[in-house]
């Protein structure tokens, strides 16, 4: 189309410029509105391309042989029979990739395929590439592995005390190799403050372990092209880290590796580190010279796991008679499973992320993470802090009960406001009070809490979460997020950024930021993301960092371009550049207007080809304490949440019916309220599911020890839409100076209070505290039975 | 999640189906709605060598009224057809009542009544319902036809009295006696899940107000439908009362020996069976 023709067409179809003018009193023209996802239509019509949709010419199918033993030494592996099967192209074992890897550079304790030992049922031992899946599966049955069985450790307490045959060798002599991380931090004199408290409450809490269950299983495809470039398509949420680890383990130059992340069908933290299949497809592709694909079965997903750690937690909270928290003392034992994964971070997060939104005088936590012979635990949405938040917020409920103070009022009295937490995290925005106000009002708390008929109850809980973490996983001073934006004379804007779209909507958020800054309709924005050959570096979709960090980078690049475009429009129309606005497909200059593509042409003529880069790096000064570990968990900005849950408990069957959850969340500026509400509902749903139903566990004893209890979606039960409470999202906007337009996170924070709010609501309903998750009918019934052990036999008619 | 290799046969008549089943012996399986068999094959829990698809056998479909007020239901009749049938609602209200408890609408749109009964899953609702309704199963095999009362049909876990080559063709439900009332109660973890426990009950009350006959069968608490014989006996001869219901619930729980699994302990299942017995009978009393 000729440019003039194009401009005429745009002028005809663009919205009325008056609509943009009408928005002028506000500082935003496009953001802040409910906007459709840019990938929504593709996903809802099934036309989106996921990794398993990729089929390359000559592609082979790979399968991975997994250990049937929870703990054993590999004595010998004989692959000759498997290799002899017609159609089998390559068989590889741990000896082919001897270098250990791990997402945290200080705790590299995994091998792509087990090297000398297997440490859980499901540990990868060998991999096969064959002409089809059936042949590959057949080959797995012909690989002979000789194991020397070792005694397994399933209970974290056993692992703590075990002597001899540790799951991993200790790094230092005399230490217990089963301890992967121990963190002990104390802020102020806790013992003194506790002794000086008017009242203390204590409890033992247990979180049981859950996994992510994304709809899309992990999948990876690799090929090595004739120029030596290794290309890997993977359903990952960390393309950059994957690129680095692939290069390291396969002894390639990082520049020789390209990682592409196609559309991902859910991740929730379960795809945030390299997995065996990614190394296996890469090496098999290099060995065979043909593309190779591996798609996990659903069963493999349950074994690869990296889900939420089971935790034994004890909390002691001291307070004044009017309910002000003086001291918090927490001791935590984390069941890490077979490998370190993100465990070093998990151990820190389990204590570090607990302090806000409350003003706590003194705090101590002691967290120990141990290895056990079970699928490895790792980060799951709300990493490290969901379990402690459960224990702590139930503790606060007990404190309120003991003091006769309304639980919402108790939380208000301890509100920290702005400033620093006791562990020295800097909080520059804090909408927690408004969150409490909103859930209190919406749930009619004042009239209903403590006054509902027996069996019905309300419970409240609060929380805080990070919007990205200040420090990258490998130490460096380079930007943590970056973007490149190009303007094309047709009016098209291309945003290239590294953020991983995993369903949370990062591609949409970046597109609408470009719309906001450059005045184009969203149909004119192309987003290219998460391709290490095409897009600048981003660290990945974890710790709720994309909106804040990549959003800032995109905003920065767009602003540079916007300044050029406005200057050119100003020159052409004879008004000052500050009077030029770019909005909704138009450049508005004083009384004049022109289609945005015309403005882009003017700018391109004046400045040459239009492109700019942007980046974001977190502030390093004044945002955390200087103590060892003080940086871990520190964030540029913090989100805040409060929930009220309403439950109905069937005292005869123990069924807990969660009827409603009011979710108030301070996400800073809500750039797209529809996506924010989706994250709030999805988070609260996941917390609800973990509270009442989900349970990741393995069998004990022989011969089944270490086998997953329920490695299918038939038996690992997650609530369907029919089983959900009504979620009522209530957005609170306390803008943060670090966030783009003031935005903070929304994808993880709103999960946390679900669990303690439900626990506290159960107490309101039936007067029984259940401090161990999950609240299954069996457990609730037993707790009720214990509570009325002396009462008359059950009667239905009563 | 793909089945192993199998041979697929699609007969045009019941005779052909029976011949194909007889040929295949224990390695042949009839395919009705496929709502249990196909997932089991995909998990490789079932690996039949021959699949005999009954899809074309229209003679096995449909709901017919019996002159005496009962029903004859073709084995290939869909759950959804029973759910929507006014005839079923009138003559076998317990069958209509139980339908929403069976899985999800998508599954009821494909699943068949005969498939469910012959599959003999201990968590299935229909075996218990048919048992308390005194249903009789019509079976045809290489040597001709026979009828089997539900009480004699279930032999154990996923095991029935059907011989290789035999096909369940129809279910005959006698009319509900005058003065009979019925109820169904179940608890499952999620909507559409297999029951943790369930109970179907029919109570016939005499002119004197006392229970003349009672039928009660439980699901998900044993190898198949569990007839609560002692509970049934305890109800007869007394009017339903708070006391008789309490006794019945206690006897039911006492007599059961349910399995423990990852979803519920034996003790909890026993408890639930008592609670459900209580609830079902309470409804009949009201």
Image (cartoon, rainbow, N blue to C red):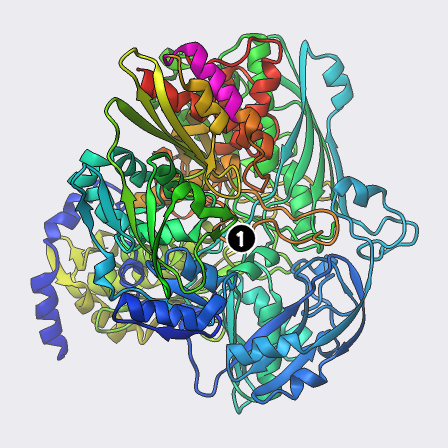
> Is there any visible trace of residue A29 in the rendered image?
no
Nearest to the observer: residue B174 or residue A445? B174
Q: Give percent across and percent down for residue A524.
A: 24, 65
Q: Quadrant of residue A437?
A: top left
Nearest to the observer: residue A537 or residue B193? B193
Q: Which image quadrant: the C terminus of chain A?
A: top left
Q: Give percent across and percent down for residue A576.
A: 22, 55
Residue B242 colored in magenta in the image: yes
The outermost residue toward the right is: A174
Tell me the residue at 42%/59% (across/down).
B37
Instruction: Give left or right: position of A248 versus A543.
Output: right
Tell me the residue at 16%/40% (across/down).
B67
The outermost residue toward the bottom is: A226
Q: Give percent across and percent down for residue A41.
A: 26, 60
The outermost residue toward the front is: B143
Q: Give percent across and percent down for residue B58.
A: 21, 62
Q: From the viewer's perspective, is residue A274 above or below residue B119?
A: below
> Is there any visible trace of residue A335 in the rendered image?
yes
Q: Mark 1 = which residue?
A: A269
Q: Which image quadrant: the N terminus of chain A?
A: bottom left
State whether the magenta stretch is mostly helix, strand or loop: helix
Q: What is the chain letter for disc 1?
A: A
Q: What element carries label 1?
A: loop
Instruction: Give left or right: position of A585 versus B41.
Output: left
Residue A47 colored in magenta in the image: no
Q: From the viewer's perspective, is residue A652 above or below residue A389?
A: above
Tell me the residue at 76%/70% (across/down).
A115
Q: Magenta residues, as a range?
A: B239-252
Q: From the viewer's perspective, is residue A680 above or below residue A415?
A: below
Using a 10 Å C-alpha cutoff, classify the residue at mark 1 as few (fewer than 14 neighbours), some (14 to 19) or many (20 or more): many
């Amino acid at each position: 189309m000729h440019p003039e023709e194009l401009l005429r067409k745009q002028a005809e179809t663009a919205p009325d410029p008056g609509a943009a003018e009408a928005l002028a009193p506000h500082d935003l023209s496009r953001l802040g509105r409910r906007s459709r996802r840019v990938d929504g239509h593709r996903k809802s019509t099934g036309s989106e391309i996921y990794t398993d949709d990729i089929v390359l010419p000559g592609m082979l199918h790979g399968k991975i042989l997994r250990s049937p033993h929870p703990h054993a030494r590999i004595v010998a592996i004989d692959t000759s029979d498997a290799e002899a099967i017609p159609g089998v192209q390559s068989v590889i074992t741990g000896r082919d990739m001897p270098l250990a890897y791990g997402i945290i550079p200080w705790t590299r304790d995994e091998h792509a395929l087990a090297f000398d030992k297997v440490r859980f049922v499901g540990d990868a031992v060998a991999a096969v590439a064959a002409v089809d899946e059936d042949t590959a599966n057949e080959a797995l049955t012909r690989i002979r592995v000789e194991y020397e069985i070792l005694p397994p450790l399933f209970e974290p307490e056993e692992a703590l005390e075990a002597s001899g045959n540790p799951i991993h060798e200790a790094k230092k002599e005399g230490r217990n190799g089963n301890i992967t991380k121990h963190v002990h931090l104390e802020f102020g004199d806790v013992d003194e403050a506790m002794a000086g408290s008017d009242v203390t409450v204590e409890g033992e809490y247990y979180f049981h372990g859950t996994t992510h269950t994304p709809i899309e299983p992990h999948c990876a495809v690799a090929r090595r092209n004739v120029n030596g470039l290794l290309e890997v398509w993977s359903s990952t949420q960390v393309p950059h880290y994957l690129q680095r680890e692939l290069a390291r383990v396969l002894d390639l130059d990082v520049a020789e590796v390209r990682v592409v992340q196609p559309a991902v069908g859910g991740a929730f933290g379960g795809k945030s580190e390299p997995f065996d299949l990614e190394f296996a497809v890469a090496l098999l592709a290099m060995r065979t010279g043909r593309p190779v694909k591996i798609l996990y079965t659903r069963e493999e997903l349950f074994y690869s796991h990296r889900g939420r750690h089971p935790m034994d937690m004890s909390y002691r909270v001291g307070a004044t008679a009017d309910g002000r928290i003086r001291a918090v003392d927490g001791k935590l034992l984390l069941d890490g499973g077979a490998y370190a994964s993100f465990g070093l971070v998990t151990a820190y997060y389990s204590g570090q992320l607990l302090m806000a939104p409350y003003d706590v005088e003194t705090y101590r936590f002691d967290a120990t993470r141990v290895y056990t012979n079970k699928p490895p635990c790792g980060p799951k949405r709300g990493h490290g802090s969901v379990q402690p938040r459960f224990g702590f917020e139930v503790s606060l409920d007990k404190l309120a009960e003991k003091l006769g103070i309304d639980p919402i009022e108790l939380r208000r009295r301890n509100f920290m406001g702005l400033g620093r937490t006791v562990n020295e995290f800097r909080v520059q925005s804090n909408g927690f009070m408004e969150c409490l106000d909103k859930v209190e009002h919406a749930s009619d708390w004042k009239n209903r809490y403590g006054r509902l008929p027996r069996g019905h109850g309300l419970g409240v809980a609060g929380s805080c979460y990070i919007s990205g973490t200040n420090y990258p996983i490998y130490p460096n001073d380079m930007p943590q997020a970056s973007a490149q934006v190009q303007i094309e004379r047709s009016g098209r804007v291309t945003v290239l950024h590294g953020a991983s779209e995993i369903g949370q909507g990062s591609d949409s958020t970046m597109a609408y930021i470009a719309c906001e800054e450059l005045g184009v309709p969203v149909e004119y924005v192309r987003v290219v993301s998460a391709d290490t050959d095409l897009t600048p570096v981003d660290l990945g979709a974890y710790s709720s960092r994309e909106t804040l960090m990549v959003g800032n980078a995109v905003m920065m690049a767009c602003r540079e371009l916007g300044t050029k475009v406005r200057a050119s429009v100003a020159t052409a129309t004879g008004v000052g550049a500050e009077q030029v606005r770019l909005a909704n497909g138009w450049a508005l200059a004083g009384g004049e207007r022109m289609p945005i593509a015309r403005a882009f042409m003017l700018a391109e003529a004046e400045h040459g080809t239009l492109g700019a880069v942007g980046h974001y790096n977190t502030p390093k000064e004044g945002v955390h304490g200087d103590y060892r570990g003080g940086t871990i968990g520190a964030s540029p900005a913090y989100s805040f949440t409060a929930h009220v849950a309403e439950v109905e408990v069937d005292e005869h069957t123990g069924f807990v019916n969660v009827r409603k959850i009011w979710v108030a969340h301070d996400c800073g500026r809500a750039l797209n309220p529809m996506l924010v509400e989706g994250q709030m509902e999805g988070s609260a749903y996941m917390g609800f599911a973990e509270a009442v139903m989900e349970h990741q566990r393995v069998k004990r004893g022989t011969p089944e020890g270490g086998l997953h209890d329920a490695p299918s979606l038939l038996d690992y039960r997650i609530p369907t839409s029919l089983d959900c409470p009504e979620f009522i999202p209530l957005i609170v906007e306390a803008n943060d100076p670090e966030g783009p337009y003031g935005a903070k996170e929304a994808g993880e924070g709103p999960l946390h209070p679900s669990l303690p709010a439900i626990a506290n609501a159960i107490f309101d309903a039936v007067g029984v505290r259940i401090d161990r998750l999950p609240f299954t009918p069996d457990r609730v019934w037993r707790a009720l039975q214990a509570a009325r052990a002396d009462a008359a036999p059950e009667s239905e008619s009563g | 999640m793909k089945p192993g290799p199998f041979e697929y046969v699609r007969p045009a008549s019941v005779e052909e189906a029976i011949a194909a089943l007889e040929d295949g012996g224990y390695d042949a399986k009839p395919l009705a709605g496929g709502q249990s068999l196909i997932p089991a094959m995909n998990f490789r829990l079932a690996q039949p060598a021959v699949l005999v698809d009954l899809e074309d056998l229209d003679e096995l479909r449909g709901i017919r009224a019996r002159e005496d007020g009962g029903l004859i239901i073709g084995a290939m009749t869909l759950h959804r057809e029973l759910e929507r049938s006014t005839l079923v609602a009138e003559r076998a209200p317990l069958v209509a009542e139980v339908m929403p408890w069976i899985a999800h609408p998508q599954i009821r749109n494909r699943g068949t009544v005969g498939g469910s009964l012959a599959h003999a899953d201990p968590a299935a609702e229909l075996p218990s319902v048919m048992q308390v309704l005194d249903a009789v199963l019509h079976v045809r095999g290489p040597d001709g036809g026979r009828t089997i009362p539900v009480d004699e049909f279930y032999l154990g876990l996923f095991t029935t009295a059907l011989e290789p080559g035999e096909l369940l063709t129809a279910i005959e439900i006698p009319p509900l006696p005058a003065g009979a009332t019925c109820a169904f109660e179940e608890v499952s973890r999620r909507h559409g899940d297999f029951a943790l426990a369930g109970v179907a009950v029919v109570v016939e009350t005499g002119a004197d107000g006392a229970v003349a006959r009672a039928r009660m069968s439980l699901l998900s608490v044993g190898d198949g439908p569990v007839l609560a014989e002692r509970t049934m006996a305890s109800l007869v001869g007394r009017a339903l009362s708070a006391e008789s219901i309490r006794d019945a619930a206690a006897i039911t729980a006492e007599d059961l020996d349910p399995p423990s699994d990852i979803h519920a302990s034996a003790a909890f299942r026993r408890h639930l069976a008592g609670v459900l017995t209580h609830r079902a009978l309470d409804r009949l009393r009201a």
